[in-house]
Amino acid sequence: MQTIRIDLRDVDHIDIQGRGHFLPPAPPKRRLDATEKKALDGALELWKLFNPQAEIFRTPIELSEHPPRVDIIPPSHVPVGLTPASKAAATLALGLNASAFAVVGISVGGGLYGSTNGELGVYNSGGLGLWSNIGVSAGPQYTFIFGPPSDFGGISWGVGCDVGPGLVSGGAMLLFSLPPFRCLGYSVSVSVGTTRLPFDVTVQASLTTTKPLLYFK
């Protein structure tokens, strides 16, 4: 067996928040020494004399000695924070975002996203938050997620700032999962609008939904 392919997209149909729970840490791995391996092989050969079907237990031993390559397609809509960050995947989103605020405000956005796991789709988002300013603005937004689309979709927190002396301003925001607040990525934007002050700080909670359109793997 050279490759194991695991497709977890059906997990999207499971109510993880209602049924799921965190698993305890896995026990530490232990490798058998040469004597223990010989004893295990001898016991298996003896067992086969009485039950030929015991040969099936040689498969996991061979897999442990010659591990296959594992390809995993993660789910797209698992709530963020319930899955660990993937070091082998990244997600990029490009879209439009608009905000209206007077200390308390709302933001909405949407666009396209693509991931290194071969997934391409569309997204939309909406959020509530606090601003140290009054105004309205809209413009393009670039988001980079340190993980697959399953980290992009769901509820997240954002802490950012906007700077602009006139009608055009630039902004940046760090994105975090629900507690324990794992850093998910960041977003940068250019906005056109009007604000009372040339600088502001914002804290937002947002909900993002993703819809995969194509898979390239």
Image (cartoon, rainbow, N blue to C red):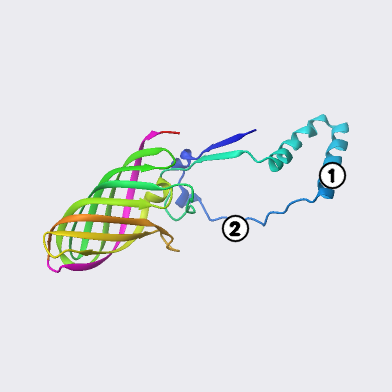
Pick whichever, 75 or 87, lies toward us: 87
Is-magenta flag for residue 174?
Answer: no
Residue 67 pos. (x, y %): 65, 41
Is 177 on the left or on the right of 166, as rendered? Answer: right
Give the mark nearer the N terminus: 2 vs 1: 2
Q: Quadrant of residue 187?
A: bottom left
Q: Choose top left, top right, bottom left or bottom right for residue 134.
A: bottom left
For disc 1, the marked residue is 38
Q: Amino acid at mark 2?
A: Pro
Q: Which residue is mark 2?
A: 24
Image spot of residue 120 (x, y percent): 36, 38
Q: Quadrant of residue 201?
A: bottom left
Determine the secondary structure under disc 1: helix
Q: Residues within 10 Å of mark 1 (few under 14, many from 20)?
A: few
The residue located at (83%, 41%) in the rendering is 41
Find the magenta span and give its range: 196-215
At mark 2, the secondary structure is: loop
Tell me: residue 132, above or below residue 9: below
